[in-house]
Image (tube, helix red, strand yellow):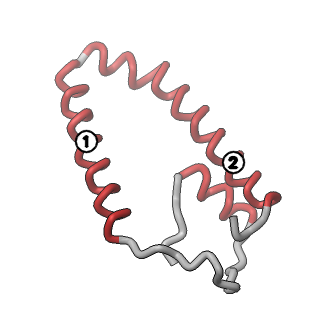
Amino acid sequence: MNYGVKNCIWTALGDVSANLFQATLVIFVIGTFLSDNPNFLNFFKWVGVIYLMYLAYDVYKSSPKDVNSKIISTKSVFSFYKDGFFGCRNKS
């Protein structure tokens, strides 16, 4: 929100390309592997549960950012794309 619409588009493009990559990977590689090995599927489900709990704890412990702050750091277009692709959030 602090960087404007033009830069948000790069973040959205990163997110969409990551979703396409993930969907392709799941359809052609991981889906076949997990259907042949259901024990791995159960293991990865629990890894996902633990990761979601970690993310919830991280959000709970983080402090809110001041939305009225006038301090805006500069970022490159690639940095916005990377943030969208990897789902990063600025912790500063």
Q: Residue at the location (69% across, 64% down)?
A: 1
Q: Residue at the location (58% across, 41% down)?
A: 18
- x%, y% of residue 32? 37, 16
**Chain-order first, disc 2 or disc 1:** 2
Quick check: 26 left or right of 48?
right
In which quadrant of the rendered view does residue 38 lie?
A: top left
- x%, y% of residue 50? 23, 47
At label 1, the amino acid type is Val
Q: Residue at the location (23% across, 18% down)?
A: 37
Quick check: 89 left or right of 32?
right
Residue farthest along the front direction in this orientation: 68
Query: Which residue is denoted by mark 1 in the rendering?
Result: 49
Q: How crowded is mark 2: few (under 14 residues within 10 Å), some or many (20 or more)?
A: some
What separation in Å lies between label 2 and label 1 (alpha carbons)? 26 Å
SS for dot 1: helix
Please tell me whether residue 25 is drawn above or below residue 8 in the rendered image: above
Viewer-proximal residue among 46 and 27: 46
Q: Which mark is residue 12?
A: 2
Q: Residue at the location (61% across, 75% down)?
A: 67
